[in-house]
Image (cartoon, grey):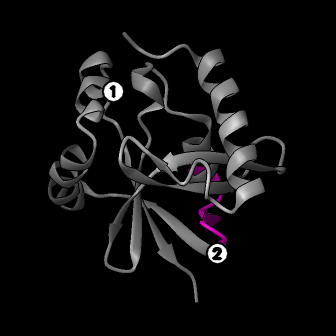
């Protein structure tokens, strides 16, 4: 069953606050995986929007999954990066600028099994929805 969007938003707000307050000491890992804070520019508002996400390190890049808990719609942060590819990530106490790109079919074919190895729950999310869950590659800027 897909996750309740209101519950996801509430948990995300608490997670984001703890992560920022402690520099990732609290909220820096979930289900054995590293977490980051992704700050995007709101597609409609132009305001900064921050979301805690599991990520996979892939050389100098980080990969995040737009699963939205298996819901039928992409998460709001994905629409934001689709409109404004420049974003910021915080990993622990470090913050850096990134350029977000949705993985192409070849990249997805290589990365999806690695993501499932890190967190098998992504398969449950994909099974819950009819949409293809985007994988987003966060490439360091500069």
Residue 93: x %, y % from top left = 66, 71
Q: What stretch is highlighted in magenta?
A: 82-95
Q: Quadrant of the N terminus?
A: top left
> Residue at the location (45% across, 62% down)?
101
Label 1 sits on a secondary structure element that is loop
> Which residue carries the number 2 mark?
94
Q: Residue 132: x, y in percent?
A: 30, 34
Q: Residue at x 54, y 34 (%)?
A: 75
Chain-order first, disc 2 or disc 1: 2
> Which secondary structure lies at badge 2?
strand
Figure check: 65 above or below 36: above
Q: Which residue lies furthest to the top in this view?
A: 1
Q: Nearer the viewer, residue 24 or 6?
A: 24
Residue at image position (64%, 28%) is 11
Q: Is residue 107 left or right of residue 3?
A: left
Q: Residues within 10 Å of mark 2 (few under 14, many from 20)?
A: few
**Spot occupied by residue 141 in the image (x, y as percentages of width and height):** 57, 82
Would you name the residue on which mark 1 appears?
A: 131
State the CA–CA distance, disc 2 to disc 1: 33 Å
Residue drawn at x 84%, y 50% as measured from the top left: 47
Of the pair 132 and 17, the residue shown nearer to us: 17
- Choose between 7 and 29: the one closer to the eye: 29
Image height of 64 relative to 70, above or below: below
Q: Is 99 positioned to the left or the right of 51 in the image? A: left
Query: Depth-wise, is mark 2 or mark 1 nearer the camera?
Result: 2
Structural crowding at the residue carrying mark 1, measured as other residues with C-alpha within 10 Å and reported as few (<14), some (14–19) or many (≥20)? some
Which numbered disc covers residue 72? none
Q: In which quarter of the image is residue 22?
A: bottom right
- Is 126 included in the stretch rendered in magenta? no
Left or right of residue 100, residue 37 in this image: right
Pick the quarter of the image with the C terminus: bottom right
The image quarter containing residue 37 is bottom right
């Amino acid at each position: 069953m897909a996750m309740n969007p209101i519950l996801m938003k509430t948990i995300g707000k608490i997670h984001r606050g703890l992560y920022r307050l402690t520099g990732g000491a609290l909220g820096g890992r979930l289900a054995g995986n590293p977490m980051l804070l992704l700050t995007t520019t709101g597609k409609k508002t132009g305001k900064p929007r921050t979301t805690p996400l599991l990520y996979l390190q892939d050389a100098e890049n980080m990969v995040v999954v737009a699963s939205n808990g298996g819901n039928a719609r992409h998460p709001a942060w994905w629409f934001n990066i689709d409109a404004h590819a420049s974003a910021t990530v915080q990993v622990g106490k470090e913050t850096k600028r990134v350029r977000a790109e949705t993985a192409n079919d070849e990249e997805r074919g290589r990365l999806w099994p690695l993501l499932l190895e890190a967190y098998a729950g992504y398969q449950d999310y994909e099974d819950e929805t009819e949409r293809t869950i985007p994988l987003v590659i966060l490439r360091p800027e500069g």
